[in-house]
Image (spheres, rainbow, N blue to C red):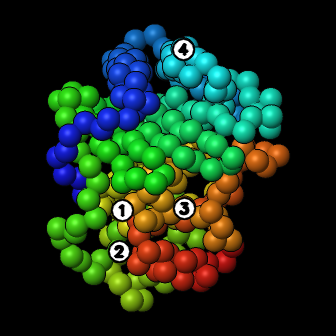
Amino acid sequence: MFITTQAPQDQQMLNLVPILAYASQILLDEYEAYCAGREFSIDEKPDQSPVTQADLKVNAYLLEQLAILTPDIPVLSEESDYSERHAWSICWMLDPLDGTKEFIHERDEFTINLSLIQNHQTIFSLIAVPTEQVMYLGYLTELPYKYSFSQNTWERYSKFKDVETDAIQVGLSHSSKNPKYQQYIDYIEQENPVIRREAGSAYKFCMMLEGEIDIYPRFHPTSEWDTSAGQGLLESIGGGLVSLKAQAFTYNQRETVLNEGFIAFRDKENQKIALDALSNVSL
């Protein structure tokens, strides 16, 4: 849960907030135009995934602003050239529209993901949720903040649990039809009731911070910009995100930017449940 607090004094955070708030407004305006049926460009990338004019507009704005704010730090973005990335010991990692398919299906569970990678580890994370006018942000070594840019209010993560329940809340994508998910849930249900919570994209990481999801399994590939910010935020509250071999992801290190599947968990208690269930799934 989050409780009201004072604004942080960290200058990098304070510099990023208006930039990401403006980027969120660009994305929200694009979404409203798309839902209203106005002319809207959707193309297909070489990997056959969709890219919209909204992805590109937000990407262009954020590349411009990050170049002004941190001119010495390159940006590894889903929508830009990152062929020189292995020469970077530090970089921003950006997904200007995480949940493009959610956007296209007129579901409002899309986000902007931004993280700072140093020596292959996420050291700062930010996830903005345009339709809710909030962002979650913070450093790996500190509890994260939640900022409402419609209300200009700050909150700080608290480990206090206001509701105790035996149920395990499992986060699933809307398209989670693979039978492995049912195997995974069946195992957990041997000891605990399960509440399924479907949501799109990195929005599920925000739900984990809010205590609405305890465990988030994903049995199909993602990319580094899909997981970096979420992993950093979860690790900062005592949770985490690991591969299907139970190893934490590292970033801008491997030959490909593709990840395998993963298991995310909100705390150590749910980590044990999550990994025990993983051992029961036929991978």
Q: What residue type is labelled 4?
A: Ile
Secondary element under disc 2, as helix, strand or loop, is: strand
Quarter where residue 48 is shown: top right
Above or below residue 238? Residue 230 is above
Question: Disc 3 to disc 1, how far (Cα)?
Answer: 13 Å
User: Is label 4 or label 1 in front?
Assistant: 4
Q: Can residue 129 be seen in this view?
A: no
- Of residues 101 and 125, the one nearer the viewer is 125
Q: Earlier in the sequence, mark 4 or mark 1?
A: 4
Q: Is residue 88 visible?
A: yes
Q: Quadrant of residue 79?
A: top right
- How far apart marks 2 and 4 lie (CA) works out to 44 Å
In this rendering, the label closer to the viewer, 3 or 1: 3
Residue identified by numbered label 3: 241
Seen in the picture, residue 243 relative to 50 is either above or below; the reply is below
Q: Which mark is residue 168?
A: 2
Please state if 263 lies on the left or on the right of 132 as rendered. right
Residue indicated by mark 4: 68
Residue 90 point in image, percent of width and height = 67, 37
Which element type, helix, strand or loop, lies under badge 1? loop
- Residue under numbered circle 1: 213
Residue found farthest to the top = 39
Q: Distance between the residues labelled 2 and 3?
A: 17 Å
Residue type pointed to by label 3? Leu
10 Å crowding of disc 4: few (<14), some (14-19), many (20+): few
Amino acid type for the residue under numbered disc 1: Ile
- Give amino acid for label 2: Ile
Is the residue 51 above or below the residue 274 in the image?
Answer: above
62 with respect to 138 (left or right): right
**Circles 2 and 3: CB distance less than 8 Å?**
no
The total of numbered circles placed on residues is 4
Q: Which of marks 2 and 3 is nearer the N terminus?
A: 2
